[in-house]
Amino acid sequence: MFTIVANFLSIIPARLIKHTFELVQESITDYQTLTDANLQATTYDRLVRSLLIYGGLMLLAAIFRGLFFFLTRWTIMVVGKRVEYELKNEIYAHYQTLPLSFYRSNSTGDLMARISEDMNQVGMYLGPAIGYGLNTVVIFLMLIPYMLMINARLTLYAVLPTLLLAAGTYHIGAFMKERSEAIQRKLSGLITFVQESFSGIGVLQAFAREAGFTKVFSKECDAYKTSFLRLTSINAMFFPAAKSIIGLGVVLVVFVGGQEVIQGRSTPGNIAEFVMYLNLLGWPTFAVSWINNIVRRAAASQKRINEFLQEKNLIFSKKALRSPIKGHISFENVSFTYPNSGVRALQSVTFEVAAGTRVAIIGATGAGKSTITHLISRLYDAGAGEIAIDGVPIQDYAVPFLRQQLGYVPQDVFLFSDTLKNNIAWGKPEATNAQIIEAAQLASIYESIQQFPQQMETMVGERGVTLSGGQKQRIAIARALIRTPKILILDDCLSAVDTQTASNILRNIEEAMQGSTVLFISHRVSSPQLADRILVLEAGELVEQGTHKDLLAHRGAYYALYRQQQRRYAK
Ligand SMILES: Nc1ncnc2c1ncn2[C@@H]1O[C@H](COP(=O)(O)OP(=O)(O)O)[C@@H](O)[C@H]1O
Ligand SMILES: [Mg+2]
């Protein structure tokens, strides 16, 4: 509605100009034919008054037209931004549902590019492109029939060049889309590169590779620039071309219209009016090429966004069981191959862990220990075999419900840029201060925290203190313990903690986690002596299981590992 009113208000002045023209012409003729000086003065006064009124009307039309154009743009922008906001939320929410395997096979930079840069392109389409597009359609629909009514022949000559422009724009469209896609791909690559070089800045500097990276960056930037410029060059040519074509229309109108005036079929007022109409059509016609460009870029971006939106999360539960678990775990002939690398990480693994017991899983790096934890927490689904908790297949439990009952300390600890307190409470957002402190004490990190300048309120990560590897591990343990989980999984999480502290923590866990199942994963043999049972993994296969004593007496893989490590520590 705003667009229609605004355009109506821009047509009115042209109409007024026509009348003014005719009025001036008539008055001059009247003036010249009149001989009486008094009557001449009256004609003159009448002309001046009329001109003032017309001028005033035009001014009013201009003011209201401005107001309505403002309202149009404001509405379109607000709607566009709101849609963009909802789309962004939808994409982010969808990202959250995607499985770990998705994140392993797509770079963070690419993910970020799609939610920011690509989303901006779509936003440009939703706001300005739709707004100007609507304006173009409205003014053409309002003006062309009107012009045809006044003078069909003149209209044809005036609009002919514009049609030419529209046809040209259409043909270049496909070409532009392809270039836009290339640009977005380059940008994704660039963001990935930059993101990675900042994450790895420590290594980068320690190896003095900054210059090399800067060179690569500059090359990538250059490639981006080049492909952007190639698109820009087409855009740049469009503008002058469009302007000359409109100019050609004006020339045609004056030429053809002039002849009609000579033949007495048109008035000079009509020509003046038509020149103004052409100017009114000028901007919307330029906009066509611009809108076309935006629509193509947005289409290319939306395609990239859709690629990820269409990614399905295959880790879900059909039965969505929500019964609380006790902590019995069983693996039956479980095999697993990482989908992205094709590495066969587990091979027909069968074992059972009774609820409330402590089991250690021992093996060299790459034996498949962490893979077992991924399968229990359903970060991945096993390819073959069956994993059950309390005798129920793991796939039957509602996924978040199952995960909420696990306490998982990953091998690569990740802490959020937040306070220590919040990082611990991450495992249980509703935790009280006392619970947070207790968890920190169990993980033997409370004393260290007290020594930080702001204690529990100390910021971690990018904006705060950098913790040592062992401190991070202990925060991660506190984060898992605060949940008092039914199943606690400790994945090699004491590797950076000294042996004395490690055995303190284990003793604390032993006491605090009565009734919970504890899976203790390690590549060291020293600590698992506390475990009720030990599983030994070798290259994805379960080679031995039993108590520490049994396995030593058995003199197999465990014994060999034990001897080897004892000798190493003895040295
Ligand atoms: N996300 C992953 N994608 C592909 N392969 C992986 C991934 N994680 C581990 N692997 C491979 O699976 C095998 C077992 O790894 P893992 O379970 O992490 O061993 P461990 O924890 O015993 O050191 C290794 O060969 C490793 O390279
Ligand atoms: Mg591991």
Image: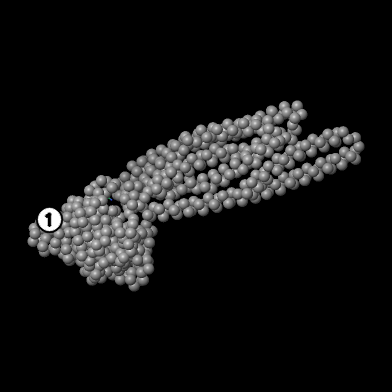
Place of residue 298 in the rendered image (x, y in percent of width and height, measured from the top left): 48, 43
Q: Quadrant of the C terminus?
A: bottom left
Q: Which kind of residue does numbered mark 1 sit on?
A: Ala
Give the total number of marks visible in the rendering: 1
| CA neighbours of label 1 inside 10 A, class few (<14), some (14 to 19), many (20+) | some
Q: Using the image, determine if residue 28 lies above or below residue 504.
A: above
Q: Using the image, determine if residue 552 lies above or below residue 272.
A: below
Q: Residue at x 51, y 42 (%)?
A: 294
Q: Using the image, determine if residue 483 lies above or below residue 82.
A: below
| Residue 340 in view here | yes
The quadrant holding residue 464 is bottom left
Question: Is residue 50 toward the left or the right of residue 85 in the image?
Answer: right
Residue tagged by mark 1? 557
Q: Residue furthest bottom?
A: 434
Place of residue 342 in the rendered image (x, y in percent of width and height, measured from the top left): 25, 46
Question: Is residue 360 toward the left or the right of residue 247 in the image?
Answer: left
